[in-house]
Amino acid sequence: QVQLVESGGGLVQAGGSLRLSCAASGNIFSINVVGWYRQAPGARRELVVSISPDGRTYYMNSVQGRFTISRDSAKNTMYLQMNSLKPEDTAVYYCNVHSLVGGEDYWGQGTQVTVSS
């Protein structure tokens, strides 16, 4: 069973930065599609960024140039560096692992990011 533990959320002023971390129970980030989703109050959960095993990335339009996904296989940890944060980035952020073998999705517990104006 895959376990994902997130950290790094918090309250920041607009224009500030945060780095989210997602630690896994095993070496899974380099062999599956992994990414970060977010869910704002009253909204649907949406994909923010993802990275495939071959390194291809996807970024939603509103975060391109501001957010960066990375992974450290030695530490079994994935990161989301968020710069130039905006109030509309406020949401609960979830890390996700999508298994390319069985198609399962695994989720972290979520971490709150709040950007004040």
Image (cartoon, rainbow, N blue to C red):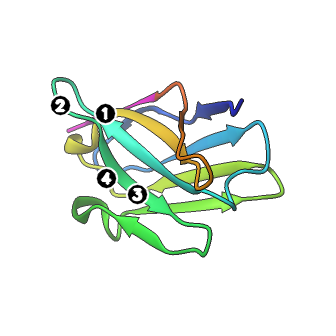
Q: Amino acid at mark 3?
A: Val
Q: What span is in magenta? A: 111-117
Classify residue 70 as left or right of residue 58.
right
Identify residue for label 1.
Answer: 91
> As rendered, which of 13 and 6 lies closer to the eye?
6
Per the image, label 1 sits on a secondary structure element best described as: strand
Q: Is residue 27 magenta?
A: no
Q: How many marks are shown on the rendered structure?
A: 4
Q: Amino acid at mark 4?
A: Gly
Q: Amino acid at mark 1?
A: Ala
Identify residue for label 2.
Answer: 43
Residue 113 visible somewhere in the drawing: yes
Q: Which residue: 46% across, 70% down?
A: 57
How far is the residue under mark 4 from the one under mark 1?
A: 16 Å
Quadrant for the C terminus in the image: top left
Per the image, label 2 sits on a secondary structure element best described as: loop
Q: Quadrant of residue 106?
A: top right
Of label 3 and label 4, which has the lower sequence position?
A: 4
List x then y, in percent, for residue 18.
48, 46
Identify residue for label 4.
Answer: 15
Q: Which residue: 77% across, 58% down?
A: 73
Give the number of the mark in front: 1 or 3. 3
State whether the magenta stretch is mostly helix, strand or loop.
strand
* Marks 4 & 1, CB-CB < 8 Å contact: no
Q: Residue furthest front?
A: 102
* Marks 1 & 2, CB-CB < 8 Å contact: yes
Identify residue for label 3.
Answer: 49
How far is the residue under mark 3 from the one under mark 4?
A: 20 Å
Quadrant for the N terminus in the image: top right
> As rendered, which of 117 and 110 lies closer to the eye?
110
How far is the residue under mark 2 from the one under mark 3?
A: 17 Å
Q: Is residue 115 magenta?
A: yes
